[in-house]
Amino acid sequence: MSTALLEVTDLRVAYGKIEAVKGISFTVNQGEVTTLIGTNGAGKTTTLRTLSGLLKPTAGTILFDGQALNTVPAHKIVALGLAHSPEGRHIFPRMTIEENLLLGAFLRKDAPGITEDVERAYALFPILGERRKQAAGTLSGGEQQMLAMGRALMSRPKLLMLDEPSMGLSPIMMQKIMATIVELKANGTTILLVEQNAQAALSLSDQGYVMQTGQIVLTGTGAELLTDESVRKSYLGED
Amino acid sequence: MRHRSLLVLSIALTGALTVTACGSRGGSKSGGDSASGTTVTIGVDAPLSGQNSATGLGIQYGVQIAVDDANKNKTVPGVTFKVKPLDDQAQPATGQQNATSLVADSSVLGVVGPLNSGVAQSMQQVFETANLVEISPSNTNPALTQGPNWASGTKVRGYKTYFRTATTDALQGAYAAQYATGTAKKKNAFVVDDKQTYGAGLAGIFKDSFTKDGGTIAGTDHVSTGDKDFSTLVTKIKSSGADMLYYGGQYDEASLLSKQLKAAGDAIPLMGGDGIFSATYVSVGGAGTEGDLSTSVGSPVDGLATAQDFIAKYKAAKYPGDYGTYGGYSYDAATAIIKAVASVAAANGGKIPSDARAKIVDGVQKADFDGIAGHVSFDEFGDTTNKQLTVYQVTGGKWVSVKTGAFTG
Amino acid sequence: MHTLPQQLANGLFLGSTYGLIAIGYTMVYGIVQLINFAHGEIFMTGGFGALTVYLVLPHGTSLWLALPLMLIGGAATSVLIALGAERFAYRPLRTAPRLAPLIAAIGLSLALQQAVHNLYPKATSPRVFPQIPSGPWHLANIDIQSGDLFTLIAAPICMVVLALFVRKSRTGRAMQATAQDPDTAQLMGIDTNRIIATAFAIGAVFAAVAAICYGLRYGQVSYDMGFEAGLKAFTAAVLGGIGNIYGAMLGGLVLGLAEALATAYISDIPGMQQLGGQAWAPVWAFVLLILVLLLRPQGLLGERVADRA
């Protein structure tokens, strides 16, 4: 039986008077890939930003690895083992690739381990290694996505949250990113994935949640959701 | 786009900050004891903070002592005088605001001030309209009393409510030039002014008189009030070969200019008008000011037997500021107003009449008494009839009078 | 033109002080996009802090001994004021519309002026600042005053230390990250509140050094000295490209040189006699600023805006 690494219960988040997340509960199990799918504005990104502390919940609890995160400031959450690769990649454009990766390890003090992990990121994404001294802003969208993922991995997280990693990428680049997620899972990384590309995401997920206007409307394994009638209609573009 | 808006913002803010910097700073509390009978207020407008404030405070407390004496001696029976000091920060716009608020206070029957000629220009019309008498202890620009064309001989008095106990720069500048060429044997002067009504006017008169007396002008330049860095100007003066520097303006800039000039190794003296004749000039300028010269209106107040009681009171009260420059004249200006109030009240059965302000203007015009700094009476332009001038020199870290007299063509 | 070397030196000394103050504007702007208009007053309080240290030292203490203590006292005062302003005036307004912190800054600036004016003993008129009792030194054709000597030593040291700090230190890298993307910087584990406070503090230390340069040069400090100096330094920061620390220093030097050369030589150009001299120097400096911003709206080094926070 898998154990829960992250347990979210009745989470509510609001921007001023507008509630974007209206009481959701879900679980991310150790070693699994869990996916949140849903249309634009369903509250997926808001949920991730709340988990990593950039937004404060108005109600509900977030239990990560046995610890409540509700009042922990954002900069302390990464130290607990939760890394977030944000939507739109948000790499530091005027720093080099290497500097970006090193910032991912900002809180770590073990210099040899950091060097080792930088090399591991280059092994995972060889193109980054080739351009390590280049300003990150000059990379293509797909390369920036690799960098954002590599940077998030630099903290050696227990849970990696990826927000829309395939957004705006070419099909080939998208496949590469998805293959990387599979590879990371095989290495034992727990992943919480937010995707608009439901087909690709669900096919590699252990567990999936469908969000609609701030609520979770459907739950199931990746395979179950892929075959669900309403999911196929709404998110997989089938009539 | 962000940069464009930043540019607009920066320019807008520059403007906004300039305006706020000129804003009123408010005055300190007036010394008001609850009066029995009628209270008459004498307004004071002078720079009480920042630029020129040392001499400005000298004016405020000069008036304060005159008022205290009048109250103690019951100069006007049944009337208690008090002082309402307002800070103009040497800014004409602030001075005008102050004038308006003094006019609006019906207990104000006379005003002493301002310090700066430029500020006086902005206040004269306000007081004229309200028929409120204004006596400046320090304004020396001739145009204030004699109109803009005074130099060509067309003298017209613009404001019948404006008087001054200081003599004009027409005499002061000429007296300075006469001393510079005659006694100090200077031949080549560099002339700098601060573009203000007083400074530019005085520097212009000095320049003309100095040339007329046989000197040459090595160069001219202008500074802005508030300037602190004169290094470039100092380099210019040094390379001009001038044997003296004449400065038309106030002690704030003059002391730094002199100090920086001497520090750069140019040992020529700076000479200025009454605007630099202040103990603060020496204390800020330090050793660099040794040997510098100034002219000032009247006879040295420290040497006047009539002023000793005033000086003792000023020191005993530990008032801030420099009494030496205009304190005596301020005392006399306030006394002229008090005496006018006394005669107006006496003529009205001991009561202040409703049209007191207009009557007091007439009273001041007729003033004729011996003040602590000299005889007080006014000519048809509102100028003092006391034409005494004194040349001072910094000797041993103090202004010491070296020559007193009246300008004689 | 035989005075040219001296005039260039005058401009450089003046410009170094502008540059030191400009660092504070540019660092804070680079990180929180706030123009801290109270920075001129932070500079002023640094001057009074240093003066206070001098006044409490036993009379007759050698200035060479007193200077390091004055530096510490001045910097401590500035830093305290800057951190207080950040914590209590700007941080609560960080998510407010951008005009709000700007207005707060202007209010703070007036409040600090008034506080020193009313509370510091005898500060209603300029207070005499101690002088280094030696010099001037002659170097080729150039006179260097003792006050300038301090500037000449302090400004480059400050700049080099800052450049190394921003590029090499962990906090420096965190600053760059915060400047480029504050939210993501938090995801890296960077305490951005601490970094923003650090930027304010560094700006304040530089302002205090500049205030001592100012005091030593002009022999006085006054409650209103921050207004004009702050305005000039802000101009220097914009000229150099606001957000860029090298731009701030370069902008300061260019501004100082422009003022010196305009004072010295504009009036020698035929027909320009009336437009030259000391009083017109700021006008020429602003003409230069407007020209630079028309041709390069991002400022001289603006291409690298905010990357070297």
Image: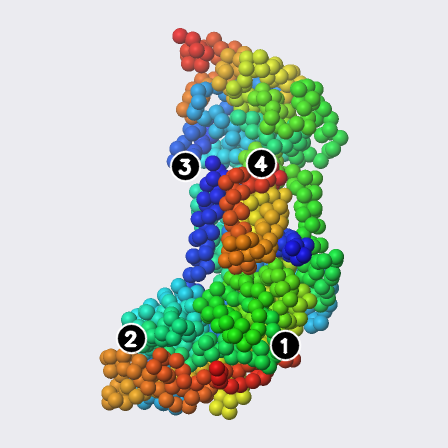
Q: In the image, what residue occupies the spot 33% across and 75% down?
A: B157
Q: Is residue C260 above or below residue B328?
A: above
Image spot of residue C2 (x, y percent): 67, 56
Q: Which residue is mark 1?
A: B291
Circle 2 Cα neighbour tier, 10 Å, few/some/many (<14 / 14–19 / ≥20): many
Is residue A146 visible in the rendered structure shown here? Answer: yes
**Residue C303 numbered tag:** 4
Question: In this rendering, do the residues under marks 3 and 4 share a single chain?
Answer: no
Image spot of residue C217 (x, y percent): 64, 62
Image spot of residue B363 (x, y percent): 31, 84
Query: What amino acid is found at the position of numbered circle 4 in the picture?
Result: Glu
Circle 3 Cα neighbour tier, 10 Å, few/some/many (<14 / 14–19 / ≥20): few
Question: In this rendering, do the residues under marks 3 and 1 share a single chain?
Answer: no
Question: In this rendering, do the residues under marks 4 and 1 share a single chain?
Answer: no
Query: What amino acid is found at the position of numbered circle 3 in the picture?
Result: Gly
Q: Chain of mark 2?
A: B
Q: CA distance from mark 3 to mark 4?
A: 36 Å
Q: In the image, what residue occupies the spot 44% across and 48% down?
A: B12
Q: Is residue B315 above or below residue C217?
A: below
